[in-house]
Image (spheres, rainbow, N blue to C red):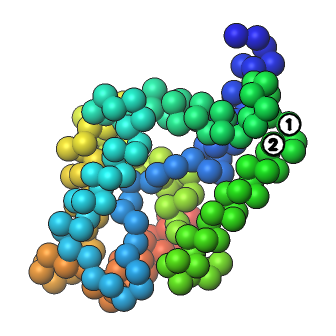
Amino acid sequence: MNTKKTLGLAAAATLATLGVAGGAIAQDAPARGAEMTRADVEERVAQRFARMDANSDGVIDASDREARARARFDRMDADGDGMLSFAEMQSARENRTEMREERRAERGENRRGHRMGRRGGMRQDMMQRADTDNDGTITQAEFTSAALVRFDHADANNDGTITADERREQRQERRAQRRQNRG
């Protein structure tokens, strides 16, 4: 592989990690006011795991992250020359912005309705907590277990359903915890 292509892949992987890396393990939030059951969470987690397990080997690890980064690079490299031009980077950025706005419109969200799960640091912390045996890989069982722990924490009355009020309370707890950790 030539040096230019190697540098191009490295730059794309870095950009993908910083700004557009896919999939936190937090389940997608349901529509405002909608309730979510454990079964809903398990279904969403299974779908998310399948998307993140790029090589379908049953675990999420560095090879999956590399495969996703290479696929993103290939999508962005419109002319297939192994390098990303400024125009290709801008085009990819515009496409992501357009798709994001379409998803927000479908969900009825405005710009302020962004998800905290898009932040790399939080995602990395969540992934590390999911790797309970600290072997550098996350199995589907670990992935599901981590999501259900978060679900159980949010389900204040232990009825198997998270309401909008319970989600709001959990969000306030997380904010308070982050403030405490910062200061």
Residue type pointed to by label 1: Ser
Front residue of 135 and 141:
141
Q: Position of residue 175 (x, y in %)?
A: 48, 74
Q: Does residue 48 sit above or below 3 in this rendering? A: below
Mark 1 surroundings within 10 Å by alpha-carbon count, few (fewer than 14), some (14 through 19), many (20 or more):
some
Pointer 2 residue:
88
Q: Does residue 152 sit above or below 173 in this rendering? A: above
Please tell me which residue is depicted at 24% across the width and 68% down the height of the picture: 40
Asked which secondary structure carries label 1, the reply is: loop
Pointer 1 residue:
85
Left or right, 70 with reference to 56: right
Residue 23 visible (yes or no): yes
Which residue lies most toward the left here? 159
Mark 2 surroundings within 10 Å by alpha-carbon count, few (fewer than 14), some (14 through 19), many (20 or more):
some
Left or right, 85 with reference to 151: right
Q: Are marks 1 and 2 in contact (CB under 8 Å)?
A: yes
Residue type pointed to by label 2: Glu
Q: Does residue 139 sit above or below 99 in this rendering? A: above
